[in-house]
Amino acid sequence: MGRITVRKPVLRLSTAGVRGRRPDTLAVEEPLEIRVAGRPLTITMRTPGDDFDLVAGFLAAEGVIGRADDLRALRYCADTTEQNTLDVVLADHVPPPDPGMTRAFATTSACGLCGKSSIEALRADRPYDVAADPVEVSPAVLARLPERLRRAQRVFDRTGGLHAAGLFDADGELLAVREDVGRHNAVDKVVGWALRAGLLPLSGRILMVSGRASFELTQKAMQAGVPVLAAVSAPSSLAVELAEDAGMTLVGFLRGETMNVYAGAHRVVT
């Protein structure tokens, strides 16, 4: 695994004229090339660490795989000097990715819509019936999630530069947390962890994200069978539309004692 943080010198200034030089800790951002059976599929920018989970979650979100036995092997490529190229061997029963997924350019750490050719294709590709999930959660449980997620962000404490995604049960117990410079990468890492552990679909679970609830994060949660997605910031209009279509519960502006429920309010009970 590569370095997660690096130290760099900075010039610290203030409006009072105070100057000083000191080292600062930064979150690492490096490219990860994903290959399938030796053939390049895509390159994404990520924070090193939990790369196997990241790739498994990415492939699950793209509809390439759906369970742990769809993967035969995940391994770093021996023809590279650093652990920034990862090769996936799919099980014999899994067809290779659609050629349209292959991209000859690097995605940024803010991009999550990768191999799908249209929004309608994303909406139609639903492996689980999220709308049928009967889970209920109280506002008191939801209100505790941001602080619990924040306490679990170990690298954020040193850098202040990483997003996080946390998976909780309906009682607010933290099951898994992952950090990354990219919000969608953090979600892929959580979903990939769950897939490799044989936990999909994530029925009765809550996915909490440290930033806004974008369309791509809602889509990734839907693909993993998550019934409740919560975010500390705002959702996009398309995220709300997708949550409504899929029967998901979408909570935004989850801060302190207040929150906005944009979709699936029937699951939030007092």
Image: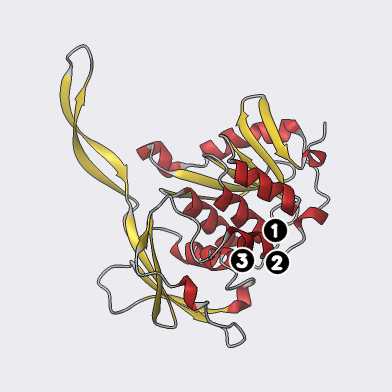
Which mark identifies residue 225?
A: 1
Q: Residue at x 66, y 56 (%)?
A: 222
Q: Amino acid at mark 2?
A: Pro
Which of disc 2 and disc 3 is earlier in sequence?
A: 2
Q: Dot 3: what SS?
A: helix
Q: Residue at x 59, y 58 (%)?
A: 119
Marks 3 and 2, how far apart in space? 13 Å
Residue 126 position in % (x across, y down): 69, 63
The residue wearing badge 3 is 195
Which of disc 2 and disc 1 is earlier in sequence?
A: 2
**Residue 1 visible (yes or no):** no
Which of disc 3 and disc 1 is earlier in sequence?
A: 3
Q: Amino acid at mark 1?
A: Gly
Label 1, residues with CA under 10 Å away: few <14, some 14-19, many ≥20: many
Residue 217 position in % (x across, y down): 57, 51
Residue 93 position in % (x across, y down): 62, 86
Marks 1 and 3, how far apart in space? 11 Å
Q: How many marks?
A: 3
Question: In this rendering, which labeled residue sits more in front, label 1 or label 3?
Answer: 1
Residue 240 position in % (x across, y down): 66, 43
- Residue 156 falls left or right of residue 64: left
Q: Amino acid at mark 3?
A: Leu
- The quadrant of the rendering that contains the N terminus is bottom left
Q: Residue at x 61, y 61 (%)?
A: 122
Marks 1 and 2, how far apart in space? 8 Å
The residue wearing badge 2 is 127
